[in-house]
Amino acid sequence: MGQVDGHALTLTNVSKSYGPVKALQNLSFSVAEGRFFVLFGPSSVGKTTTLRTIAGLATPDRGRIEIFGRDWTHEPIAGRGVSMVFQSFALYPHLTVYENFAYPLVEARVGRDEIDRRVKETAAMLRLEPKIDRKPGTLSGGEQQRVALGRSLIGRPRILLLDEPLTNLDAKLRHDMRAELKRLHRQFGLTIVYATPDELEALSMGEEIAVLREGAVVQTGTPDELYETPRDLYVAGKIGSPHMNMIKGTLSRDGTAVESAMGPLPFAVKRNTVEAGQAAVVGIRPSDIRLAAPGEDGVDANIAMLEPLGDVTVVSIETGGETLRLVLPESAASDLHPGQRASIVLDPGTFHVFRASTGQAIT
C-alpha cells in the first residue's frame, strides 16, 4: 500500500465528459504526502469534477488515478482513505452535531466508547463542545462549516478534499476559517486538495497551486513561482493583485525590444527565440513601475485615477494609448490628483514577454 515516490496522489491524463461538455481534458498533476495543494481557476474549469474523480464519486473516461501508489481509477469509493467537504456543507439537518460527527463511525461499525471519545475530541479541536447537542439549522455558517469539516476528519482520512468550502461565508469568517484550516493541516499532517476560484485564498493557503483552464492544468508551482515566472498570459493575468499590466506590440527586428504604442520596451537580455514582427505582449507588474525622481528620464504619462487602499494607493495612469496601474505607498501618493502630469520609470529586468498568438512566455 505504501507509495514509492512520496506522492499521496497522482492524476495522469484524466479526461471526463458529460455529454458534449468536456469537464476534464488530459488533466495531470501529483500531490506530495502532507502537502496543502490548491486547484485554482474560475468556475467551470473542472475543479469539482477533479475532486469527485479523486473521491470515486465520478469515474474518468480515460486516464489514471493513483492514491498512495495504488491504481484506484475504477475502484469503489470505500477504502480510498479520502474524504470530501462540499461547498453546501451537506449536513444532516435532523441530527445533532454529535450525531453528525458520529454518523460515519456508526456506518464503519466503530465501538460506542471509541465513537464517544472521537466525537468529543473532534468537537474540542473545532471548538464546538458547547454546540454538540444542537442541530445544524441553529448554527452560524462558520459553525456549520466546522461541523462539515469535523465529520470529514473524524474518519481519519489520509487525503482531505475541500470544494470551495468558504464560498458561503462572509469575509471575516473566511479569514478566520483560512487560519483554522492551516492549523488543522499542520496539526494532522494531512494531505489536502483544496479547490477555489479565489486568488487570495489560493496564494495564502496553497503550498503548491495548480492553475486550471478548460479542464487541464496550465501551470503548477509555489505561489512565488507562479508570481515570478508565469508560463503564459493566462497564469500571468490570474496571479497577482492588482493584475499585471499587459502592453501589446510587435517584436523588434533585432530581438531586443517590443515596439508598442508607448514606444520601444527594451529587454534586459536579448531573446533568441523571437521572430521580428511577431505580435507580442509585455507584462509589467504594478509594483515594478515607479514615478521618476526629479531630473530622471521617464515615460510621460497622465494620472487618470487613484484608489486608496489604506497603506498603499493604486494609481492608474495613461500613456501612449495604454492605461497602466502602479502601486505606491500611501505617503507617496498623497500629493497626486487625477489630470496631473507624471513621469514613470519601467525596469526592463522585470518585464514578462509573451507570444500574442499562443500566450506562451518567451524566455
Image (spheres, rainbow, N blue to C red):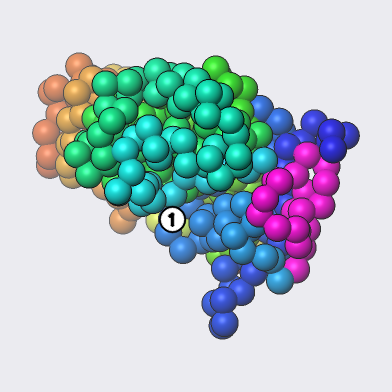
Which stretch did the figure color magenta?
A: 62-80
Residue 104 belongs to magenta span: no
Residue 79 belongs to magenta span: yes
The residue located at (14%, 22%) in the rendering is 334
The residue located at (53%, 40%) in the rendering is 106
**Is residue 277 shown left or right of residue 43?**
right
Report which quarter residue 287 is drawn in. Answer: top left
Residue corresponding to mark 1: 42
- Residue found at the far right of this picture: 4
The residue located at (67%, 65%) in the rendering is 59
**Is residue 298 shown left or right of residue 235?**
left
Pick the front one: 305 or 299: 305
Secondary structure, mark 1, is loop
Quadrant that contains the C terminus: top right
Quadrant that contains the N terminus: top right
Q: Specify few, some or many for label 1: CA neighbours under 10 Å numbering under 14, 14-19, or 20 or more.
A: some
The x, y position of residue 218, in whole percent, is 62, 53
Q: Indicate the amino acid at tag 1.
A: Pro
- Residue found at the far front of this picture: 112
Pick the front one: 8 or 289: 8
187 over 314 or under it: above or below: above
Report which quarter residue 210 is drawn in. Answer: top right
Give the number of marks. 1
The x, y position of residue 316, in whole percent, is 25, 41
Pick the front one: 338 or 82: 82
**Is residue 348 shown left or right of residue 58?**
left
Is residue 229 in view?
A: no
The residue located at (57%, 82%) in the rendering is 19
The x, y position of residue 274, in whole percent, is 70, 55
76 over 182 or under it: above or below: below
